[in-house]
Amino acid sequence: MVTACDNAVTKTRSTFLVKNGNEWNIQIPNSWCAKKTTDTLYYSTIYNPKTKMYQPVSKTIDIETFDLLFNDIEDRKKINNNYYLRYNEGMQSEYYFKDKHYIYIYTCYSQVNSELFIAGSSSDYAVLGGDYLRVENAIYYGGKKIDGADVNTFRTKNEIRHDSEWDETIGLDKNYIYITDKPIKSREEFDKEFDDRCLFTDPALREQYFGDGK
């Protein structure tokens, strides 16, 4: 269950964890999925894909260890991009959480359509760079699963912008280049995406994936 409110709630422990009566809620402030971006969304349940059921936050998370993933200093170092480090300062990334049992992901599909779910075990994940994360056999960007990404070959690369001093982190696997969570499937699409995002064209990367004129 999710509710929205712009009123203050007493915070305890993690700033994303609040007490509502006898139950714990997870709060997502300033969410694009709220009716107003100044609202805070409160989750009293978490979706478990394995059981296909929603279960109470209080009976799912470990209160003592629950926190933002990137509050872990070692995980934060692996972002490996000063732009993301600066952009996420204070809030870090509000998409990824962990405790001693699980990795939890918050996904915003559209306004008033969001979900908080168990992605997998917190003993089997890796920060890949930028906002890319592997959890068990899946790759995520910005809280969204990248369908079809090859887990075994997936890696990241920082590309230079020509309108900014900040790099952009892109994804790569044996099949595709990924801009955010989107696979690039043609040379034309590659050129357009790099141009639209003000990235310097990477001839070696284009040649590797698309060859001459592909």
Image (cartoon, helix red, strand yellow):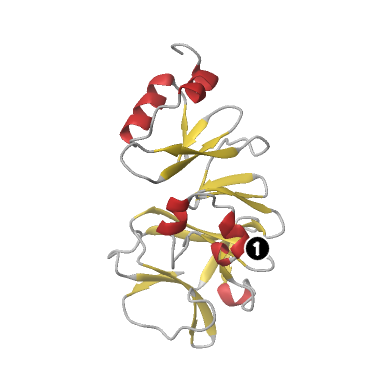
Q: Is residue 19 above or below residue 207?
A: below
70 horizontally vs 214: left or right: right
State the residue lying farthest toward the top. 212
Mark 1 Cα-neighbour bin, 10 Å: few <14, some 14–19, many ≥20? many
Residue at image position (37%, 71%) is 40
Which quarter of the picture shows residue 191? Answer: top left
Name, please, the residue furthest toward the right: 123
Residue sitting at x 41%, y 26%: 190
What amino acid type is highlighted by mark number 1? Tyr
Q: Determine if residue 118 is in view.
A: no
**What is the x, y in percent for residue 194?**
38, 31
Among all residues in the image, which is located at the extreme front? 165
Residue for point 63% across, 60% down: 74
In the rendered image of this protein, does residue 46 appear above or below residue 78? Answer: below
Which of the 4 image quarters holds residue 35? Answer: bottom left
Q: Position of residue 92 (x, y in %)?
A: 47, 62
Secondary element under disc 1, as helix, strand or loop, is strand
Which residue is the site of mark 1?
A: 102
Q: Quadrant of residue 99?
A: bottom right
From the viewer's side, name the closer residue of 147 and 126.
Answer: 126
What is the x, y in percent for residue 205? 51, 25
| Whether residue 13 can be seen here | yes
Relative to the observer, which residue lies in front, 114 or 211?
Answer: 211
Nearer-the-camera pick, 102 or 206: 206
Image location (x, y in percent) of residue 174: 61, 28
